[in-house]
Amino acid sequence: MAYQKRLEQADYNAWLQGNYIRDAIGSCLMDKKYKYPKQPYSMNKTEGDGLSEEEQFLLWIDAYNRKYDGEN
């Protein structure tokens, strides 16, 4: 259980780092409307379902795993 949580956290961290890299490259190469975020994503709470990006990602992981658990 703890090992699985560490894997999920490492996966989430890699995904988050990829988003920051994408934003950095986009802000350099794209038009002026594409900006690098001024603060971390976790501080940019969006209205909607009230879930953080991490919570949304963990829900996505659960749904993905359930999809493939039934095939084995």
Image (cartoon, rainbow, N blue to C red):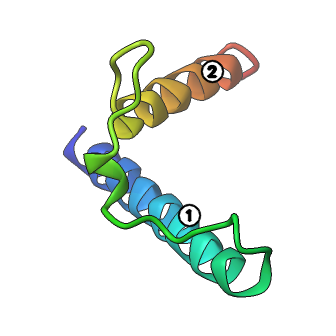
- Name the residue: 77% across, 85% down: 29
* Residue position for label 2: 69
* First reached walking from the N terminus: tag 1 or tag 2: 1
User: Would you name the residue on which mark 1 appears?
Assistant: 19
| Residue drawn 29% across the image and 48% down it | 42
In the visual, does 24 lie left or right of 2?
A: right
- Quadrant placement of the N terminus: top left
- Residue toward you, 54 or 10: 54
Q: Is residue 61 left or right of residue 10?
A: right
7, above or below 1, in the image: below
Q: Dividing the picture into quarters, in which one does residue 50 lie?
A: top left
Q: How far across and how far down the image is residue 51, in percent?
A: 35, 22
For the residue labelled by badge 1, is the local secondary structure a helix, a strand or a loop?
helix
Residue 71: horizontal and vertical position, in percent?
Answer: 76, 19
Crowd class of label 2 (few under 14; some 14 to 19; many from 20; radius 10 Å) = few
Residue at 46% x, 24% y is 59
For the C terminus, the quadrant is top right
